[in-house]
Image (tube, rainbow, N blue to C red):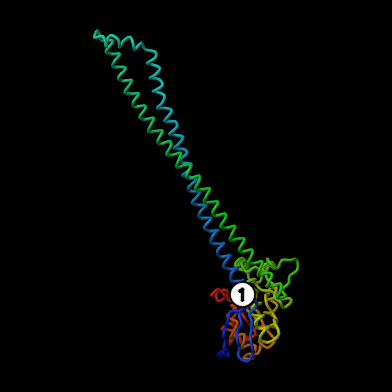
Amino acid sequence: MGQAVAEQVSVAGLAGGVVRQTGGAGLERDPPNLTELKKEAEQSAKDLEEATKALEQRRAQLASADKELSAKLRQLQVADRELAVVRQPLSNLVGMLYQQSGSGDIAPFLSGSSDESTLRAMGDITQLVARRDQVVKDTGRLNEERERLATEAQDLRAGKLLGEAQMAVEIDTLRKRSDKIVKSLTQSLTKLGVKVKGGQLAVRCDPTRAEAAGRFPNGLVPESYLCPLQQKGHELRADAAVAFISLNEAYRQRFGRPMCVSDSYRSLAAQQSVYYTRPGFAAVPGRSNHGLGLAVDLCGGVERFRSAEFNWLEANSKRYGWIHPQWAYSNPFEPWHWEYDPKLAAG
């Protein structure tokens, strides 16, 4: 397997891209912002996903708060009923005072000529006053409890509404930011000659959809999840495609021509065809990285091991998330086969 030809590289930030000094090849400029836009789009999607999860957690908390609010309101209703029950005896007592000739009974007591009936009347009045005082005390306590419950219920309502509003604004802001980045990325791809019929470039080349594309079976990825390359007739998964286009532009600056692509995404049917017509040169159908939209076969010099094109790609491709896999150095020997590694690209 040999070491890659070393290149002396110096990086300086310039407007429009990163300039690299390559041995004997002059200045080499990265495509403007493309790689950075891809990373920003992926980070934005990650932020949006995390915010959405936070919203779901918040909604779960709000559901719990709703239960608490309902409990408070039920307690409030109970307090209202208890208050009404406590007030009723007081009303009855007042009625009794009006119905009884209490003043006639009290006069003898005040004059000193009280008898048994007078004393009984005074005892009744004392009892009524005591019961009235207890009713007033209970009424005050229940009123305080009712006010406390009403305040807590209002606080829960306000907290719920505020929490929902804040999360909605945050998610809307993140979504708009993500859309803006994807739009900028799409514009950059269009300037680089990437085209697709029906105006679906923004959708098909959105790297934030890569995870969703990875859920489809090998070789059965829908076309709407595949981004076209500058090389006509070739497609890859969006994140791999954007990274390859960046790599392709750097290659073009070094060699004066774009990379030659002989194969990219392979449907399951195409994998079966290659497997049976070229035994030993293709993975078992349904197991190939081509079927995931994460691999290319290259020509134009790269297919010749240790050619200038191969060595340059080996030395520079990892910056874009592309590698020549270890197995392809010997078993089977396929210098033309290159794969995209999302973990490497994220590093």
Residue at 31% of width from left, 17% of height from top? 124
Q: On screen, 146 above or below 288?
A: above
Q: Is residue 34 above or below residue 324?
A: above
* Residue 108 in view: yes
Residue located beneath label 1 in the image: 35
Q: Give coordinates of residue 261: x percent, y percent.
A: 69, 81
Quadrant location of the N terminus?
Answer: bottom right
Query: Is residue 81 shown above or below 338?
Result: above
Q: How many marks?
A: 1
**Three-letter code for the amino acid on which mark 1 is drawn:** Thr
- Residue found at the far front of this picture: 15
Identify whether 113 is placed above or below 61. Answer: above
Can residue 220 be seen here? The reply is: no
Question: Which quadrant of the figure has residue 277?
Answer: bottom right
Q: Residue at x 37, y 33 (%)?
A: 141
Q: Position of residue 178 (x, y in %)?
A: 61, 64
Report the residue at 38% width, 16% height from top: 96
Q: Tell me which corner region of the image, top left, top right, bottom left or bottom right, holds residue 13.
A: bottom right
Residue closer to the observer: 283 or 259: 259
Tell me if 151 is positioned left or right of 286 in this view.
left
Q: In the image, is 47 to the left or to the right of 109?
A: right
Element assignment for label 1: helix
Q: Residue furthest left?
A: 112
Q: Residue 11 in the image: x percent, y percent?
A: 57, 83
Residue 109 position by quadrant: top left
- Tell me: 342 left or right of 98: right
**Residue that extends furthest to the top in the rendered view of this protein:** 113
Label 1 Cα neighbours within 10 Å, binned few <14 / some 14-19 / many ≥20: many
